[in-house]
Amino acid sequence: MSDILSITSNIAREAGALLMPFFERRVRVEYKGEVDLVTEADRASEALIIDRIRKEFPDHGVVAEEGGGYEGSSGYCWYIDPLDGTTNFAHSFPVFCVSMGLEKDGQMVAGVVYDPTRKELFSAEKGAGAKLNGRPIQVSAIAGLSEALVATGFPSRKRHENPNIHLYHQFNMNTHGVRRPGSAALDLAYVAAGRLDAFWEFHLHSWDIAAGKLLVQEAGGVVTQYNGKPHGLDSGSIAAANRELQPQLLEMFREIFAGKYPAALPELRPPD
């Protein structure tokens, strides 16, 4: 598995290097479906990654965001996001990454998240811990939600129909703050590195979270659904934190969905 992780790291770095010239010249944006963006950079990165996987691991399957996946014969399956944070990328906002997670018979066994703007490679191997540029990382030691810096994300459109807009206010009033960087894979990597204390989001895809989930777990953190149920790559929600914060995070969800708002909703007034 260490050899696989080394090869994966090289592929992710190569894909990240491919993305940067596109980023610097601001590529043309297209829509896939009603709201989701895609660029030629997404497609070029995915093509490169799949080409490398076919050569290095010809019997592995692939699930990829831009539709280039295929079935394998070995029990191994890759979950690939060739450019997580496309909206950021399209607006020249430098928060995006390449995410590659490897599953074996239903268990995540290796994962890499690469941020080419900062040249930061987050990697994890099942049972062997998580690393940032080769150095071990751990989740934070923050023990109270009121002291935590947390992150979340929102859908590109119809945010008013997503329950997260209500959760955002409550968490923002009961923590040190909520960040919304726009890349779920990087958010999870930052939880693993202790830069964020917790992360939650709804309606993510398997390729968004496969690598990041393993990073958090191998860095000593916990990953569940928002209701505390075990998390799978097809789950409708994800909640990740250190072991001290996770029960508090889940309790906040229970209270909010029960209509027990920890923070009163403010009266809207114009500023003086």
Image: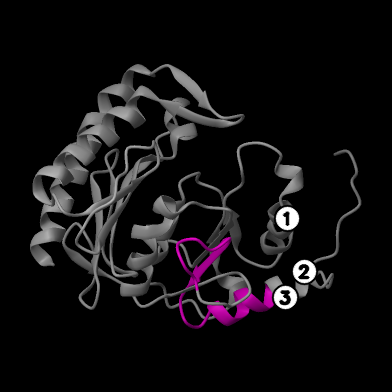
Mark earlier in primary sequence (2, 1): 1
Secondary structure of the residue carrying numbered label 2: helix
Viewed as shown, does residue 169 lie left or right of 231?
right
Residue 177: x, y in percent? Answer: 60, 59
Do the residues under discs 2 and 3 have CB atoms within 8 angstroms?
A: yes
Tell me the residue at 44%/39% (across/down): 85
For disc 3, the marked residue is: 254
Most foreground residue, 207 or 195:
207
Secondary structure of the residue carrying numbered label 1: loop
Most foreground residue, 100 or 132:
100
Q: How far apart are the two marked residues, 2 and 3, measured between alpha carbons?
A: 5 Å
- Magenta residues span 231-252
Q: How far apart are the two marked residues, 2 and 1, measured between alpha carbons?
A: 9 Å
Question: Badge 1, how many Cα within 10 Å: few under 14, some, many 20+?
Answer: few
**How many numbered badges does the structure rendering display?**
3
For disc 1, the marked residue is: 163
Viewed as shown, does residue 226 lie left or right of 190?
right
Q: What amino acid is at disc 3?
A: Arg
Q: How far apart are the two marked residues, 1 and 3, measured between alpha carbons?
A: 13 Å
Question: Badge 2, how many Cα within 10 Å: few under 14, some, many 20+?
Answer: few
Residue 94: x, y in percent? Answer: 39, 35
Residue 80: x, y in percent? Answer: 32, 47
For disc 2, the marked residue is: 257
